Image (cartoon, rainbow, N blue to C red):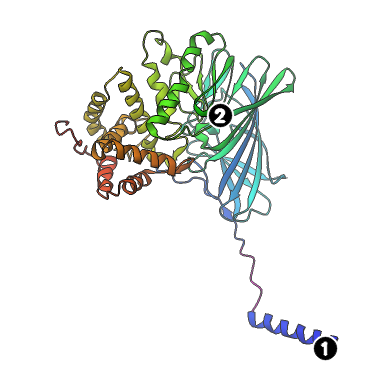
Amino acid sequence: MTRTVRAAIATAAALAVMALAGPAQADPFDPKPGADGVGDPLFPTLGNGGYDVRHYDLSFDFTPVTYDFTGTMKISAKATQDLSSFNLDIDSLAIEKVTVNGADADFAVSLGKSGQELTVTPAGGIHDNTPFEVAVTYHGNGKTKPIGAPGWRYMSDGGFASAAQSTRADTFAPVNDTTMDKATWSFHLTAPDGWTPGANGTLTGTRPAGEGKTTSDFSLNVPMASELLGISVEKQTLLTGEGPHGVKLRHYVPDDQVAKYQPIVEQTGGQIAWLEKTLGVRFPFGTYGMQIVRDGYSDALENQTLSLFGPNWFKNAATSPTYTNVMVHEMTHQWFGDSVTPRTWQSAWLNEGPAVYYAALWADQQGTASMEDKMKTAYGKLDAVRKTDGPPGLPTELGGFNIYDGASVVLYALNQQVGQDQYDAIMKSWLTKHRHSVADSQDFIDNAVNVTHDPSLRPFLEDWLFSKDNPPMPGHPDWS
């Protein structure tokens, strides 16, 4: 048989197989728009579906006093479906240009329920499970009234600090503004010489930016939810130190009040050591610090690796040590809320309950307040709050007594039920198992049952978290 004959026979055989197999299968690519919300029980339109952000890279150039800014947000993401378009959350940002994988993409801005939706339509769409790069160039003014909640805090020196929790990060940059989508971050903050930028993570360097400006670069190489964004530009001084096992400490304080605040921020190393011993888990990040602003903010907030404080917490620092309670509260959040983040805001008690609980334990051990008295008072108040604002595990909104003191009462009840050793084991396992990830109330219940091998803890915790009436407090039958 000649080579030509053999080739003809092979070709015929191949054609026969193709005929038996039928027509070629069509390309399964079926692009659809990503969802414009992730269905959070308290904030249904926050966040977006169809992709997972892996890294944010924010360049932000701020002009003090006028509050004008320009920005470029570069996003590394991966599609979780075939995408014809996808959304990012913004609020009061003027979008100039959007590219996807380096090519210009169509975009549109529409009104959302908590801000605005930036809809991006890349040419040809994006296949499921495919990495892609987005770059959004924009500008704005920090004094512009947002459609949703404001994230800007204005300082009398003409600077600012960000307080982004829970829906405000989109007033600074385009983000996927949901706790479900944590990512690593890089920051490049540019300001006039003489002004000091601050941001989450580690300061990796500074460089001239021209026109009398300097750019400060920061890196956060562990995942962070956008609501924990902590950026600032102020007349502030950077103070550095070292905490347990090499944790880098860096604090920002008003540049004319260093002598007042330096003795305060220097206590953080000892507080980290106390929490590590109490929780049985090392500090979850390589750096930590306090940012104490000069004015314009009166609360405290657990921005990841850089907690934000108003000056009012420390006005009596020379005569009363109780200001350390709020320092421990926000530091506790670095474990509970920042490292282990609630999957939805319905589980916010997992942030605030431990922060209140361990700050109360700190105060008790410092001899400044009785933990049992605090828990008894909170238990008495919680019963009525359950009926008006929802139980700790089913709040009707954020910021209420139920997810703060009420949730600490839940943890106190768990401790009373299982004993100190088992309680400590539950909390240690929780922090270890869900380190740098997201979890919710059911995960907490599952963990408690698995650690103790006690299935009765499931209905016990369900009653404490979800019932409209206070269950009896173990060990305290007289509490009512």
The magenta stretch spans which residues?
22-28
Mark found first going from the N terminus, 1 or 2? 1
Q: Say which residue appears at 56% left-offset and 55% top-offset.
A: 81
- How many marks overall? 2
Compare residues 224 and 174 and report the one nearer the observer: 224
| Left or right of 383 in this view: 52 | right
How busy is the neighbourhood of tag 1: few (under 14 within 10 Å), some, or many (20 plus)?
A: few
Residue 11: quadrant of the picture? bottom right
Q: Residue 113 location, x and y as percent?
A: 47, 38
Within the magenta stretch, is there residue 147?
Answer: no
Q: Say which residue appears at 44% left-offset and 26% top-offset.
A: 273
Compare residues 392 and 147 and report the one nearer the observer: 392
Using the image, determine if residue 312 lies above or below residue 190: above
Q: Residue 292 location, x and y as percent?
A: 50, 17
Q: CA distance from mark 1 to mark 2?
A: 72 Å
Callout 2 amino acid: Asn
SS assignment for the magenta stretch, majority: loop
In which quadrant will I find the N terminus? bottom right
Residue furthest bottom as drawn: 1
| Left or right of 127 in this view: 445 | left
Q: Which mark is residue 200?
A: 2
Q: Dot 1 corresponds to which residue?
A: 5
Residue furthest front as drawn: 245
Within the magenta stretch, is there residue 24?
Answer: yes
Q: Residue 247 location, x and y as percent?
A: 53, 28
In which quadrant will I find the C terminus? top left
User: The residue tagged with tag 2: helix, strand or loop?
Assistant: loop
Using the image, determine if residue 59 lies above or below residue 107: above
| Left or right of 245 in this view: 414 | left
Q: Residue 465 location, x and y as percent?
A: 29, 40
User: The residue tagged with tag 1: helix, strand or loop?
Assistant: helix
Q: Is residue 445 visible?
A: yes
